Protein backbone atom coordinates (compact mmCIF):
# COMPACT_ATOMS: atom_id res chain seq x y z
CA UNK A 1 0.00 0.00 0.00
CA UNK A 2 1.26 3.42 -0.99
CA UNK A 3 -0.12 6.92 -1.05
CA UNK A 4 -0.20 9.03 -4.20
CA UNK A 5 -2.43 10.97 -6.56
CA UNK A 6 -4.21 9.56 -9.57
CA UNK A 7 -4.25 11.95 -12.51
CA UNK A 8 -4.65 9.88 -15.65
CA UNK A 9 -5.80 10.73 -19.15
CA UNK A 10 -8.20 8.41 -20.94
CA UNK A 11 -5.26 6.81 -22.77
CA UNK A 12 -3.34 6.33 -19.52
CA UNK A 13 -6.42 4.78 -17.89
CA UNK A 14 -6.65 2.30 -20.76
CA UNK A 15 -2.93 1.52 -20.43
CA UNK A 16 -3.40 0.94 -16.68
CA UNK A 17 -6.27 -1.46 -17.47
CA UNK A 18 -4.09 -3.31 -19.99
CA UNK A 19 -1.24 -3.62 -17.48
CA UNK A 20 -3.60 -4.90 -14.79
CA UNK A 21 -5.04 -7.48 -17.20
CA UNK A 22 -1.52 -8.63 -18.10
CA UNK A 23 -0.61 -9.00 -14.41
CA UNK A 24 -3.79 -11.00 -13.77
CA UNK A 25 -2.86 -13.31 -16.65
CA UNK A 26 0.67 -13.76 -15.31
CA UNK A 27 -0.12 -14.18 -11.62
CA UNK A 28 -3.77 -15.19 -11.53
CA UNK A 29 -6.59 -13.48 -9.72
CA UNK A 30 -5.81 -11.22 -6.81
CA UNK A 31 -6.99 -8.16 -4.97
CA UNK A 32 -5.92 -4.59 -5.65
CA UNK A 33 -7.05 -1.76 -3.38
CA UNK A 34 -6.83 1.85 -4.48
CA UNK A 35 -6.93 4.34 -1.62
CA UNK A 36 -8.33 7.63 -2.88
CA UNK A 37 -9.29 10.19 -0.24
CA UNK A 38 -9.61 13.01 -2.82
CA UNK A 39 -12.90 13.10 -4.72
CA UNK A 40 -11.27 13.29 -8.16
CA UNK A 41 -9.02 10.28 -7.45
CA UNK A 42 -11.92 8.31 -6.01
CA UNK A 43 -14.04 9.07 -9.09
CA UNK A 44 -11.23 7.95 -11.42
CA UNK A 45 -10.79 4.74 -9.45
CA UNK A 46 -14.53 4.05 -9.54
CA UNK A 47 -14.55 4.69 -13.29
CA UNK A 48 -11.73 2.19 -13.77
CA UNK A 49 -13.56 -0.32 -11.58
CA UNK A 50 -16.81 0.02 -13.51
CA UNK A 51 -15.18 -0.14 -16.94
CA UNK A 52 -13.08 -3.16 -16.00
CA UNK A 53 -15.23 -5.12 -13.56
CA UNK A 54 -15.21 -8.19 -15.83
CA UNK A 55 -11.48 -8.01 -16.61
CA UNK A 56 -10.40 -7.08 -13.07
CA UNK A 57 -13.00 -8.21 -10.51
CA UNK A 58 -10.48 -8.04 -7.64
CA UNK A 59 -10.20 -4.24 -7.79
CA UNK A 60 -11.84 -1.92 -5.26
CA UNK A 61 -11.58 1.76 -4.30
CA UNK A 62 -11.55 3.03 -0.74
CA UNK A 63 -11.40 6.41 0.99
CA UNK A 64 -8.98 5.30 3.74
CA UNK A 65 -6.04 2.97 4.27
CA UNK A 66 -7.92 1.32 7.14
CA UNK A 67 -10.84 0.37 4.87
CA UNK A 68 -8.46 -0.92 2.21
CA UNK A 69 -6.43 -2.99 4.68
CA UNK A 70 -9.59 -4.49 6.16
CA UNK A 71 -10.85 -5.51 2.71
CA UNK A 72 -7.47 -6.91 1.65
CA UNK A 73 -7.38 -9.04 4.83
CA UNK A 74 -10.70 -10.72 3.96
CA UNK A 75 -11.28 -13.47 1.45
CA UNK A 76 -14.17 -11.52 -0.03
CA UNK A 77 -14.17 -10.40 -3.66
CA UNK A 78 -14.43 -6.73 -4.58
CA UNK A 79 -17.80 -5.15 -3.88
Image (spheres, rainbow, N blue to C red):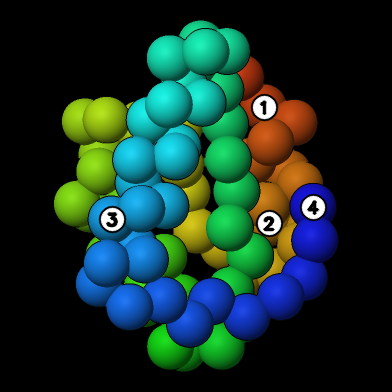
Measured Cα–Cα span from mark 3 to mark 2: 26 Å
Mark 4 or mark 2, earlier in chain: 4
Q: Label 4 near label 3: C-beta < 8 Å?
A: no
What is the quadrant of the C terminus in the image?
Answer: top left
Measured Cα–Cα span from mark 3 to mark 4: 22 Å
Of tags 4 and 2, the one toward the viewer is 4
Q: Label 2 near label 3: C-beta < 8 Å?
A: no
Residue 69, percent from left and from top:
76, 47
> How packed is label 2: few (under 14 Cα within 10 Å), some, or many (20 or more)?
few
Residue 78, percent from left and from top:
44, 36
Measured Cα–Cα span from mark 3 to mark 1: 28 Å
Label 3: state its secondary structure. helix
Q: Give the residue at mark 4.
A: 1
Residue 73, percent from left and from top:
75, 31
Measured Cα–Cα span from mark 4 to mark 1: 16 Å
Identify the residue at horizontal 25%, vertical 39% (top origin).
Answer: 53
Residue 14: mark in rendering: 3
Mark 3 or mark 1, earlier in chain: 3
Q: Is residue 47 above or below residue 15?
A: below
Identify the residue at horizontal 43%, vertical 26% (top origin).
Answer: 22
Q: Is residue 29 visible?
A: yes
Q: Is residue 25 above or below residue 33?
A: above
Mark 4 or mark 1, earlier in chain: 4
Label 1: state its secondary structure. loop
Q: Label 2 near label 1: C-beta < 8 Å?
A: no
Q: Give the residue at mark 2.
A: 67
Identify the residue at horizontal 46%, vertical 21% (top origin).
Answer: 24
Of tags 4 and 1, the one toward the viewer is 4
Amino acid sequence: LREGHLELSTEEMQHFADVMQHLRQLYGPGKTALVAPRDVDYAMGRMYGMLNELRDPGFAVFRSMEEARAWLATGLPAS
